[in-house]
Image (cartoon, helix red, strand yellow):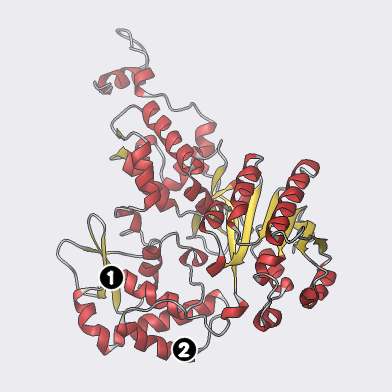
Amino acid sequence: MNSNAPYNTGIFIDIENLTKGYGISPKVVKGLSIKEIIRLILDTEKTGRIAVHKAYANWFNPKLSFLLNDLVDLDIEPITVFGTHGGNLRNVSDIRLCIDVMEVLHTHPEITCYVIISGDGAYANLVHQLHQYGKTVIGCAYKNATNKMFSAVCDHFIWIEDPELENERINIRVADTRNMHLIDKMKDNGEPDNNNLIWIKINDLIQQISRSKEYKKSLEQGINPSVIRELLDATIPNFDPSALGYDRFIDFLVHATKKTDLSVYFTPPSNFKVGFKGFKPTGSVAMQNKNDDKNKVSDFVLKDERIKRLVRDVKHINANGSTTEITEKLKEIIGWMSADIEFKHSFVEGVNPSTVDCAIKEVIIGFSYKQLGFPRFSDMLCSLLQNTELCIAQCKTNSSNWKVFFKDSLPNSFTVYTSQATEKEESTQPIIPWDNIPTAKENAPNLLMQLANKFKPSHK
């Protein structure tokens, strides 16, 4: 943890949720580590230093003694709760945690990040309340025991390994018999413990698919990407494309197959197939890596559910409208995206600019950033986001990696992009919409104004 980071984080641990009650199994005793959970949280670099640290349970229960050393070493305040007259201890613990969070909210305004270690859906309403006060909320729990509503409303969610499933991690239902055979081969290759090793395993898996006799005929005709997703889920615990920098699985797959014998093919409006290079379904296009200027993924239709809702909610216009109309529509699109609950969660993690570009083109038909005078889309986006809670940022170690973040959740590995084109525009006269240019009088000395009137479009 950076020693200069502010003390702006409060961590609240629902112990009963982590131990799954008080009939604690030997696997939980052996595998549950509060130290490891806190390390995972701090490693995200989304928190500051811990100012409040509380853990809720019936600490008089001797079955919890295996956690006491962690509490002492981490200086966690144990909050003891009791059930009354046979009442539900779980509800008492939840209520006490919520009360303490609200007390901290009003007595310590410097606490801006709240971490709730639990998978209980009852905390979803608490998250909504914290958001109303402009606070960031991070959830943390077992993936197989987390309420979907709670994980959806959190700004960021950290999945922790369930100690009871330590020897049963490959518990994904596998329906494809070809995948079953490959899974048996992959089990003996060890497990990846960081992103580099994950990519090594992914590359190995893609290579085995392309060389497999069982897959050969299918790949000559094209297979559904969901087949590969099933295989990845079954062989890599807690596989998540967003953890590798991709908003969508299809974007990840395009990159993963780039240097292999396979390619991803797109047939409008929304059909994707994976096949051998050279195989090309009628009317399809081989998708290129998203950083390849020749053929970006955003040049195809990105029909994810978020953009579908955007198209339903925001009235579309044609790109031949006035500059004022287009600018106002751009602001409306950004405002909608920053308010949408799914996009909000994505902006905390970082959204590819291509997704924003696609959203804009779905609403402003025929739009190009060049018609507003910007040399690059990133320059236009930089200008558009200036007075919003969003920003476009560039990775410090990989200049080709761009993301759109909430300004208050910008990771240390990224730096906010400042467009030279934007700075130049600010030092000169602002863009004047065509419709606002005054009519030039006869023999007016201003040649530029005369040209403007001559070429002024006749549409409204």
Residue at the disc numbered 2? 187
Please give the name of the residue rendered at 50% of the width and 53% of the height, measured from the top-left corner.
Answer: 346
Please give the name of the residue rendered at 55% of the width and 85% of the height, measured from the top-left corner.
Answer: 167
Q: Is residue 432 left or right of residue 136?
A: left
Q: Is residue 410 visible?
A: no
Q: Position of residue 19 (x, y in %)?
A: 67, 71
Mark 2 burial class by Cα count in 10 Å: few <14, some 14-19, many 20+: few
Q: Which quadrant holds residue 93? A: bottom right
Residue farthest top in this picture = 442
Please determine whether, in this image, residue 335 is positioned above or below residue 452: below
Please determine whether, in this image, residue 208 is positioned above or below residue 422: below
Mark 1 burial class by Cα count in 10 Å: few <14, some 14-19, many 20+: some
Closest to the observer: 396 or 59?
59
Q: Position of residue 286 (x, y in %)?
A: 26, 66
Q: Is residue 389 visible?
A: yes
Q: What amino acid type should be assigned to the residue bearing mark 2?
A: Lys
Please determine whether, in this image, residue 289 is positioned above or below residue 193: above
Quadrant where the N terminus lies? bottom right
Please determine whether, in this image, residue 82 is positioned above or below residue 70: above
Q: Could you give the CA–CA distance between mark 1 and mark 2, rounded to whole angstroms?
A: 23 Å
Residue farthest left in this picture = 282
Q: Position of residue 397 (x, y in %)?
A: 57, 64
Q: Position of residue 53 (x, y in %)?
A: 78, 59
SS under mark 1? loop
Disc 1 to disc 2: CB gap under 8 Å: no
Residue 195 is tagged as: none
Mark with earlier residue (1, 2): 2
SS under mark 2? helix
Residue at the disc numbered 1? 224
Callout count: 2
